[in-house]
Amino acid sequence: MTGIRLEHLTKRFKNQVAVEDVSADIRNGEFVVILGASGSGKTTILRMIAGLEVQTSGHVYIGDMLVDDYEPRDRNIAMVFQTYALYPHLSVRKNIGFGLKVRHVERSEIDRRVTAVAELLGISETLDRRPSELSGGQRQRVALGRAIVRDPEAFLLDEPLSNLDAKIRSSARIELKRLHSQLGQTFVFVTHDQTEAMTLGDRLAVMNHGRLLQYDTPERVLSHPTNRFVASFVGSPEMDFLEGSVEPTGGSYTFISGPIQIPVRGVGRPGPVTIGLRPWDITVHQAAGAGSVPARVAGVERLGSSDQVFLEVGPPGAPGPGGLPAPPLTLRALVRSYDFEVGNMVSIGFDADRALYFTADGNRIESMSAPTRVG
Ligand code: ADP
Ligand code: MG
């Protein structure tokens, strides 16, 4: 078992940049999740670590070893593909043992290891079946088993849960996490699913268009996103954004956006700014209160344990260019299930301490919440 270091990794296909200047340190035994939309370069990073793709520039280290010139088989890294890539005509036993057979491991040793891995994964009773006779979850375990049996330095997993039904995906996540702690090995796991990323990762690497935007714990990525892209990509339901400006109000500063006023903690910089609020940091009350912001419930999505409500804030907009009213500002909030119905007139409040501030070009402003006295 060992860590992995990526140094200024770049990959271009003809004139398309798939991965751009990605540097990251993956610690020994860590579970790192690479999170990004389709096409953001996740698979290409895994393939460069495995040696299946040669980088255009930059370096890959496995442990202390620079492996840029190593063939895939000499890197001792196991990759589990999205499609599992099982051999359909071979039994589960032979599928799991295949990599050992081609390495000329002794037959009795292969048997011993395959049996142990099947037990670890709870698929002992499937050993004599073929992949077509297995459920999706069992196939996914066979693919994992094939990787584990080789006892690699690290595991690269490319969206291994994405072909599973939503119902078993949650238990598959728990299984995978348990497996990771049992094996104690380095896992690099790729997904486009932020729930998967948040639940599995010790650290997340958030990618967009080939760039690594943030590399931090799930908690930090959620509470301190480096920019607006990360803020809206991570967290469910998605973050609300309010365009407005910070204005001096007496001895302090206030963020103002139409009817919404949110006190700015610490020193404010007057000027235009975007505020980001998580839907669970917006409170909704049945009746309008003095000084509160009126809103209308325009939509309700029942999520089971809670509801996501869409709120039209403030009075209908002033006439726009065509004489029609401008669309009202719509926010989403997470509330207790069945508390509100479409058409309810409500009032809303904001947890000002939890507001994030962004510049016009989307970078998060740290100093807004700095504990500096307004003077
Ligand atoms: P992800 O796994 O995040 O969906 P990929 O790493 O597969 O993204 O791809 C990143 C970008 O590189 C995409 O735009 C994709 O079209 C491009 N790409 C990947 N592999 C190749 C290839 N072999 N030839 C040309 N373009 C490729
Ligand atoms: Mg991919």
Image: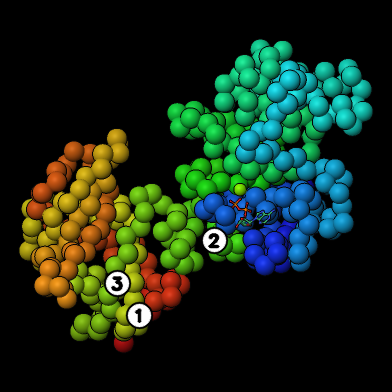
Where residue 240 appears, as percent x and y from the top left, is: 32, 60
Instruction: Give me the residue at 62% from left, 16% from top.
Output: 133
Asked which quadrant contains residue 183, the reply is top right
User: Of the numbered discs in the image, which one, if any, rests on residue 208?
Assistant: 2
Residue at 27%, 46% in the rendered image: 308
Q: Which mark, by number, is residue 267?
A: 1
Kindly state the secondary structure of the residue where label 2 is placed: strand
Above or below residue 74? Residue 226 is: below
- Extreme-bottom residue of the structure: 375
Mark 1 or 2, nearer chain start: 2
Residue 366 position in % (x across, y down): 44, 73
Q: Considering the image in quadrants, where does the N terminus appear?
A: top right
The Cα–Cα distance between marks 3 and 2, rounded to whole angstroms, is 23 Å
The answer, for residue 196, to whether it is visible in the render is yes
- Residue type at mark 1 is Val
Q: What's the mark number on residue 243? A: 3
